[in-house]
Image: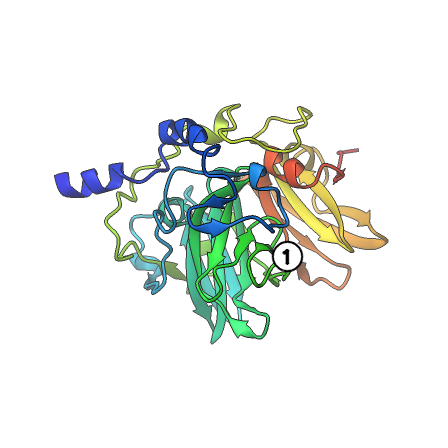
Amino acid sequence: MKTAQKSASLIPSLLLLLATSLTLTVAHGANKNGFDLNKSLISSEDIHQGGPPRDGIPAINRPKFIKARKADFLHKNDRVLALFRNGRAKAYPIAIMNWHEIVNDTIGGEAVVITYCPLCGTGVAFSAHAANRKLDFGVSGLLYNSDVLLYDRQTESLWSQLLGQAISGTLKGTKLKPVVLEHTLWGDWQQRHPNTKVLSTDTGSRRDYKRDPYAGYENSQGIYFPVTHKNPRYHPKERVLGLEINGRFKAYPFSELSQATEPVADSFEEQQINIHYDKEYQSARAFNAQGDEIATITSFWFAWYAFHPDTAIYSAP
């Protein structure tokens, strides 16, 4: 037990280390954690070292899954990222994602990558195929706008999670195809998908998944790394549902959705959008006029605005 606790304490996701690691971002110029940023789409001055080295936060490369009834470490109010695709359902507990941030997985034979940034509250899934090849991803240890930068092991290109785009390396400018991913509570997902598989705590790493290394963070005003744009309209950690249509962006703050009649019928970029918000489960989903679910991002307000300062914002009538 003492050995496991010692190993867990080394994980650089503790808030103190996140704060103090800001001092590391100045001295390394355009080469950080071994990544050459000289020709990056983002200025190297805006890319910060989060504390850990490359792969210091270990991605899960061979995920194991268990049946829902065996996931006794989960409680109904625990948050999960959840995927239903190719007739299969899978849940990725935030309690595990906090410590790993990336799961390289397959669902129904399709290669996908599940990503989570604890600092931005963002869970995003992508197809793992880009530029006519299958990619495997790791955690670079670098941040842009306080958001995780992934890297692919095939070309060592850096990828912005929230931009869904490679910002350096041979694949610079390439975009990943987003996959619909829900951000909800375990009780909700298990009820709707009782046959779901659940990511196992048997990850191959020694971590205390019962402990939240970011406890208190999502309710605080604090942002621990620089961001390019700020807007005090909402609490920094207000959850919003963000979507992109035709290169334009819109945010649906949960505080606004909670005041509206459900479902919320909206129009954006000349398209009919229906937002389904569940106040009990603190989750939201978007559908087009044909009833097809749209890939969206649930995010903290500060993170969405940092990336999209020109975002449209839904206000309750």
**Left of 100 or right of it: where is 181?**
right
User: In the drawing, does residue 103 fall left or right of residue 163?
Assistant: left
Q: Residue at x 22, y 42 (%)?
A: 7
Residue 303, quarter of picture: top right
Query: How many numbered markers are drawn?
Result: 1
Q: Position of residue 155 (x, y in %)?
A: 49, 64
What is the basis of the colouring in this image? Answer: rainbow
Farthest residue to the right: give it: 270
Image height of 197 relative to 141, above or below = below
Query: Looking at the image, which is closer to me, 157 or 267?
Result: 157
Nearer to the camera, 82 or 300 = 300
Q: Is residue 38 visible?
A: yes
Please give the name of the residue rendered at 49% of the width and 53% of the height, measured from the top-left corner.
150
Location of mark 1 (residue): 295
Residue 309, above or below 216: below
Helix, strand or loop status at disc 1 = loop
Name which residue type carries label 1: Ala
Q: Residue at x 60, y 51 (%)?
A: 39
Q: Position of residue 149 (x, y in %)?
A: 51, 48
